Image (cartoon, helix red, strand yellow):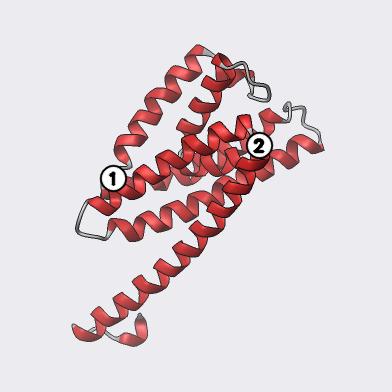
Amino acid sequence: MVFASGWAAGINAYATVLVLGLMGRFLDTGGVPEGFQRTDVLIVMAVLALVEFVADKIPLVDSIWDAPSTVVRPAAGALIGALAAGANGDLLTITLAAVGGVTALLSHVGKASIRLAVNTSPEPVSNVAASMAGDVGVVGISVLAVLFPLVAAAIAALLLVGMLALAWFLAVRVRRGWRLVRRRFGGDPATA
């Protein structure tokens, strides 16, 4: 559950905590930290998830929003891991916090990199489609993390590898594109 939830938190930490909290509260599923199920936490997470949902659809706002999320998302992944372990300060807590935090950081880096490349596209369709794919992924993986943790972890691992590969592929293409633009318009290709 920690690995899959960490992946989801790296995409949208607020929606992940919201989905986990709602599942724990209303479906009485085990393994969801009780703090996530509190009414005040659910309300705050719902508001922040809504703000991120809207911000994520606007290309420039999305990239700006991703900057502070570089801290928030891995911290949320680590918190999920620590609370899932019982937050006793023992080796299990530290290990699961590290798994959640590192997984969230890697999925955030993949998401932010892909979205930065997509956001350079002049048409809004690809940005909204990428955002919606992330939204569906977060909800789906979060639900699976509670109900079928091993399946969720396997899917999250595949998504993580795919995201990082796509981010690398797009970064290479964007860099080549910038080199071509600089050559054509008088820039120094050696500095590209």
Q: CA distance from mark 2 to mark 1?
A: 33 Å
Q: Quadrant of residue 141?
A: top right
Q: Residue at x 54, y 31 (%)?
A: 143
Q: Measured from the top left, where is residue 166 in percent x and y?
A: 45, 63
Which residue does the image show at 57% across and 54% down from the upper left?
158
Residue at screen point 31% across, 48% down: 129
Judge from the rendering whether residue 16 lies leftward or rightward of residue 127; answer left or right: right
Picture layout, residue 4 above or below residue 44: below
Instruction: Say which residue label 2 marks.
Output: 149
Tell me which corner region of the image, top left, top right, bottom left or bottom right, holds residue 7. top right
Quarter of the image containing the C terminus? bottom left
- Is residue 123 at all visible to an observer of this figure? yes
Q: Position of residue 120 (x, y in %)?
A: 27, 60
Residue lying furthest top:
39
Name the residue type under label 2. Answer: Pro
Q: Nearer the viewer, residue 51 or 185?
A: 51
Q: Residue at x 56, y 15 (%)?
A: 25
* Mark 2 burial class by Cα count in 10 Å: few <14, some 14-19, many 20+: some
In the image, taking residue 182 as reference, residue 173 lies left or right, namely: right
As helix, strand or loop, the secondary structure at mark 2 comes to helix
Q: Which mark is residue 61?
A: 1
Number of numbered labels in the structure image:
2
Apparent side of residue 45 relative to residue 81 in the rendered image (left or right):
left
The three-letter amino acid code for the residue at tag 1 is Val
Q: Which mark is residue 184?
A: none
